[in-house]
Amino acid sequence: MVSERAGRLALVEPGGEITHLGGVPEVHAHGQGGLLDLALHPDYGDGENDWIYFTWSKPDSGRTATALSRARLAETSLTDVETLFEQSRYSSPGRHYGSRLAWRPDGTLLMSIGDRGQSPERAQASDDHAGSVLRLTATGQAPTDNPFIDDNALDELFTLGNRNIQGLIVDAQGEAWATEHGPLGGDELNYLMAGENYGWPEVSQERTTPRVPPSASARCPACASPCTSSRALRAIRPDPGQRGHLPRLGAPSAGRRPAQRTTAASGDRERTGHRQ
């Protein structure tokens, strides 16, 4: 099954025959928006949990939001389509929707949402889903043990300070990793930890002025500390037990990992071009 950004969902048979499925919601296919990621329920095939999950740019009165839906497959069409979640704020269409999906071993679903491009500071706002990773139940609710559940923040939040995660996996050990583009250099590989702030836009290695190093910056003292290495992404090997998608960016130049984990050698930085 292949999602097409323009809003079509293709079922590709082993022999190469392609069927475009009906029943897909009307997406707003503009810029980076459209039909985005796909993920099957971990127990897909048992009859009860035969759900296909997908993210998409949902339109409303000229504005859009990243949304999560699920549906069942009936021959050549989706059925029982339901929207499980949509981000709290709609904004101008076109940029930084995210959006990747990856299941955790505990049966919860990670979902990335970009900062939406026009107001990067939204990634630092705990009352906004933009620029974050969410952790949801299979029905789109916030689990009761989410890291911000007792704070003055949105319950669905798992991490903050992410620019626009477009690569996300949960590996065979149950650990979550994400890749995202920087605006002008500063591409990142991050090991995701519940409740962490990954710094964007206060902390970045982008080649703009002023340039803020991704260290324990006074501008964002609570942000996760990075290692700076493009070797880090190469060290993560494909694993049949992993869930999600982690594409290699042009040249990742920064990554944040918890202090107790082994970090790659610093200084192995590569130049990257402009990212949208």
Image (spheres, rainbow, N blue to C red):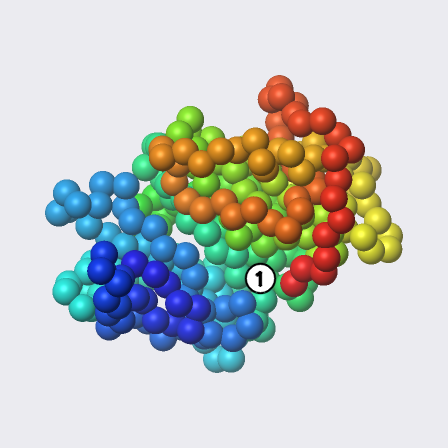
- Residue 216 in sight from this viewpoint: no
- Depth check: give the residue in front, 274 or 257: 274
Rendered image quadrant of residue 235: top right
At 36% from the left and 48% from the top, the residue drawn is: 141
At 54% from the left and 67% from the top, the residue drawn is: 32
| Residue extending farthest bottom | 61
Rendered image quadrant of residue 199: top right
- Element at label 1: loop
- The crowding category of the residue bearing disc 1, from other C-alpha atoms within 10 Å (few below 14, some 14 to 19, many at least 20), is many
**The N terminus appears in which quarter of the rendering?**
bottom left
Q: Amino acid at mark 1?
A: His
- Depth check: give the residue in front, 236 or 276: 236
- Depth check: give the residue in front, 168 or 55: 168
195 sits to left or right of 28:
right
At 68% from the left and 52% from the top, the residue drawn is: 182
102 sits to left or right of 30:
left
Label 1 sits on residue: 96
List x then y, in percent, for residue 43: 22, 41
The answer to whether 260 is drawn above or below residue 62 in the figure is above
List x then y, in percent, for residue 82: 28, 62
List x then y, in percent, for residue 152: 56, 44
List x then y, in percent, for residue 248: 56, 46
42 sits to left or right of 189:
left
- Residue 249 in sight from this viewpoint: yes
Rendered image quadrant of residue 230: top right
